[in-house]
Image (cartoon, rainbow, N blue to C red):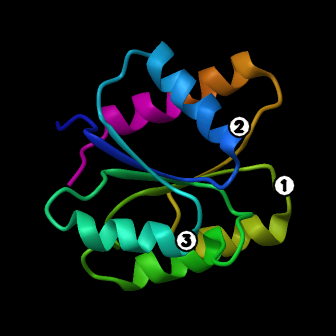
Amino acid sequence: MKALTHLLLLEDDAIEIMKFERVIQKLATSFTLSIAHDGAIALETLQQAKDHLPELILLDLNMPNFNGIEFLRSVKKEPAWCHIPCVVLTTSDNRIDLMDCYREGIAGYFLKPLRYDDYVALIQSILAYWNNSHLV
């Protein structure tokens, strides 16, 4: 079993990024965190990562320019990246978004909780699940 060593977070909201980073510090988790503010930047990050690809991608759907679903379509078509689990963290409870994401091969779809303590618990459970999974 291999523990997470590198995460990629796709998020355009600075407050959400700070909240995620605070949770990571609180959980005392040690891994590399790459942050991309839209799907195009995330694709560049993956291209540059070559030998150190993230083991998990966490993404928001609602981003400018190149949104989360467009990003998923690109990642899942690329043989070098299609194996990386992608987990959606979003405020969208739109069933169409949910179905589109699963059609594109996501590993999970989670609504961002409003309460900070609930958000901490969610991130902790997602990371624990993937740390206990057999990763490539």
Name the element at disc 3: helix
Is 109 situated above or below 115? below
Q: Position of residue 131 (x, y in %)?
A: 32, 33
Q: Which residue occupies 80% across, 22% down?
A: 115
Q: Which residues are magenta?
A: 125-136
Residue 131 shown in magenta = yes
Q: Quadrant of the N terminus?
A: top left
Residue wearing tag 3? 39
Q: Position of residue 71 (x, y in %)?
A: 54, 75
The picture quadrant where one finds residue 39 is: bottom right
Instruction: Give the side of residue 78 with respect to residue 57, left or right.
Output: left
Q: Amino acid at mark 2?
A: Ile
- Residue where numbered disc 2 is placed: 15
User: Could you tell whether 7 is left or right of 25 in the image?
Assistant: left
Q: Earlier in the sequence, mark 3 or mark 2?
A: 2
Asked if residue 105 lies left or right of residue 3, the reply is right
| Image spot of residue 93 (x, y percent) | 84, 54
Residue at image x 47%, y 25%? Answer: 24
Say which amino acid is labelled 3.
Answer: Gly
Q: Residue at x 61, y 53 (%)?
A: 11
Q: 41 or 112: which is nearer to us?
A: 41
Label 3, label 2: how far apart the Cα atoms are:
18 Å
Q: Residue at x 24, y 76 (%)?
A: 80
Secondary structure beneath label 2: helix
To which residue does mark 1 refer?
A: 93
As drawn, 129 above or below 24: below
Picture quarter containing residue 119?
Answer: top right
Question: Disc 3 to disc 1, how far (Cα)?
Answer: 20 Å
* Comparing labels 3 and 1, the label whose residue is closer to the camera: 3
* Amino acid beneath label 1: Asp
